[in-house]
Amino acid sequence: MQIGYKLATEAFGPNELIRQAVLAEAAGFDFVEMSDHYHPWLETQGHSPFTWTVLGAIAQQTERVGLVTGVTCPTVRYHPAIIAQAAATLALVSGGRFTLGVGAGERLNEHIVGDGFPDTAAGRHRLLREALEIIRLLWRGGYQSYEGRFLRLCDARVFDLPDELPVIAVAASGGQSARMAAELGDGLFATEPKPGVVERYREAGGDGPRYAEVTVAWAKDEDTGARAAWETARWGVTGWKVMSELPNPVNFEAATATVRVEDIRSAFACGTDPQRYIELAQPFVDAGFDHLVLQNNGPDPDGFIDFYQRELDQRLRKLTPTG
């Protein structure tokens, strides 16, 4: 079992994220993960720096901890040729510590370039499939061209390629995307403890790392943690149908108007009781995930990292599937 720390790119500026990554490495986390957003989910979060710049800086200020995009969308805001180049470069400057997490994206971030964002999940998955094919093609080396239904590549070459290419972990929420992760990726990425997703991935031949995010809100008491998470992370209980469709933070403000602090308590591990964190992580282990990412939405990141080192590290690593 590997344990990661989710750097909250929507809640902190770039220099603070770098500082937290250094702390996470010292505390024993195996990797740090960053979303790749253009906008925060809510205006109250107040941040959204460029992920690739921050990851490059983290690579230079750390020695051991892995680096993961969780996740980037290589289809609309970026052309996959740019992601192929960026990921190869980050793998080189990090000494092979980078994992490229990719997904079909959210309208929140992809609509901003004005090129349109597919209205259906099937359309987004078709785009993602072509993007993965282009990235794989460019990573073979040499000049490459590609003519897809949605994406094109014209006589392009990534000149600086690492000897060992980055692992590609593909975000999945159902059977179709899980099979794509097995076919075109090297690993799986998910945000819900769905055993069926891991089963479809394995049935399709997938045998790589399986990442999953566990939402927590550490604070010195449960109420403080829950209220902090409500203020900045209540979008997390809306479900993927909402999260993938709304275009701007103001829309998420409206969509979460009825979310209660009690809803946060039931979905997040809040406060200082280690057992609650273990209870929230166990279903992901039961579902077959072996890389757990702790996404802290509490008000004190330093306090949480210290709590993890003292109370959670060994307990989480010892988790095994029940039954």
Image (tube, rainbow, N blue to C red):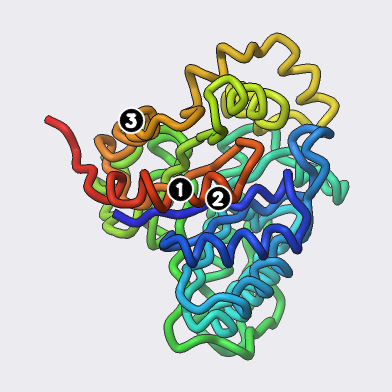
Q: Position of residue 182 (x, y in %)?
A: 35, 54
Front residue of this view, candidates 226 and 214 = 226
Residue 186's mark? none
Name the side, left or right, on which 105 lies relative to 205: right
Report which residue position mark 1 lands on. Answer: 293
Q: Position of residue 215 (x, y in %)?
A: 51, 35
Q: Amino acid at mark 2?
A: Lys
| CB within 8 Å, label 1 to label 3 | no
Front residue of this view, candidates 218 and 251 = 218
For image coordinates 44% across by 68% down, the residue present is: 167
Q: CA distance from mark 2 to mark 1?
A: 6 Å
Q: Quadrant of the N terminus?
A: bottom left
| CB within 8 Å, label 2 to label 1 | yes
**Residue 94 position (above or below residue 82):** below
**Residue 98 position (above or below residue 240):** below
Residue 6's mark? 2
Q: CA distance from mark 2 to mark 3?
A: 20 Å
Front residue of this view, candidates 28 and 153 = 28
CA neighbours of label 2 inside 10 A, class few (<14), some (14 to 19), many (20+) = many
Report which residue position mark 3 lands on. Answer: 275
